[in-house]
Image (cartoon, helix red, strand yellow):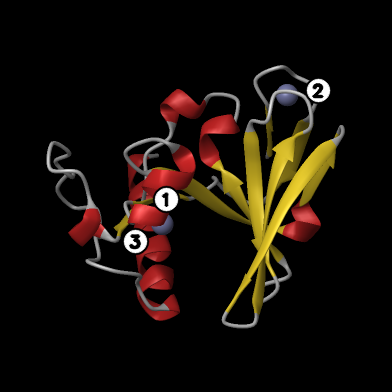
Amino acid sequence: MTEAGSCECGSVAYSLTSDGPVHVYACHCLNCQTRSGSAFAEHAMVPASAFACEGTTTTYSRTANDIRFEEVFCDVCHTRLFNRNSALPDMIFLRAGTLAGSQKLEPIVHMWTRRKQHWISLPDGVPSFEESPTPEQFGAAVQQAQQRNSADR
Ligand SMILES: [Zn+2]
Ligand SMILES: [Zn+2]
């Protein structure tokens, strides 16, 4: 299954090959609100080996707790396309709103709900966490989403 996406101006395009659907999560933390200039951030974790990006990008880097964080933008229109960090070098944190067909996405996890904007009501049956879930909790949510997907078929 190949998914693709691009920045707003189209100078940077990416594609990703993965075995199943792309799992998107929503982060309602204050950093995500500030960085996105929006109510929450929608990310998808994808293996770096399945991700290919073409076009000229600009990277904003910062270091916190000895982890280097990079945020990658289109050099022309400055759409933020993905993040990566030195703690999980094999993963790309895709900004899911840049995926083609992003209107069909549905987060499988909501995190940092204690910071979420009050007008947002979360759907029933989708795991949500007041702060960041543990990797085990996140893994369980992915499994739950996979089971839902296969039940729908
Ligand atoms: Zn662009
Ligand atoms: Zn966040």
Q: Quadrant of ligand 1?
A: top right
Calculate the distance from the C-alpha at mark 1 to the C-alpha at mark 2: 25 Å
Q: Quadrant of the N terminus?
A: top right
In this figure, which residue is indicated by the disc labeled 3? Answer: 144
| Horizontal arrangement in the rendering, residue 24 relative to residue 14 (left or right) | left
In this figure, which residue is indicated by the disc labeled 2? Answer: 11
Calculate the distance from the C-alpha at mark 2 to the C-alpha at mark 3: 36 Å
**SS assignment at label 2:** loop
* Residue 6 vertical position relative to residue 116 in the rendered view, above or below: above
| Horizontal arrangement in the rendering, residue 91 relative to residue 129 (left or right) | right
Q: Look at label 1 and name its amino acid.
A: Cys
**SS assignment at label 3:** helix
Q: Name the residue: 13% across, 36% down.
A: 119
Q: Name the residue: 42% across, 50% down.
A: 32
Which of the marked residues, 3 or 1, is nearer the chain's N terminus?
A: 1
Q: Look at label 2 and name its amino acid.
A: Ser
Please name whichever residue, 19 or 86, is drawn nearer the observer in this view of the structure: 86
Q: Nearer the viewer, mark 3 or mark 1?
A: 1
Neighbourhood count class around disc 2 (C-alpha, 10 Å): few under 14, some 14–19, many 20 upward: some
Residue 9 position, x and y percent, is 71, 17
| Horizontal arrangement in the rendering, residue 129 relative to residue 76 (left or right) | left
Residue 105 position, x and y percent, is 43, 34
Q: Which mark is residue 32?
A: 1
Calculate the distance from the C-alpha at mark 3 to the C-alpha at mark 1: 25 Å
Neighbourhood count class around disc 1 (C-alpha, 10 Å): few under 14, some 14–19, many 20 upward: some
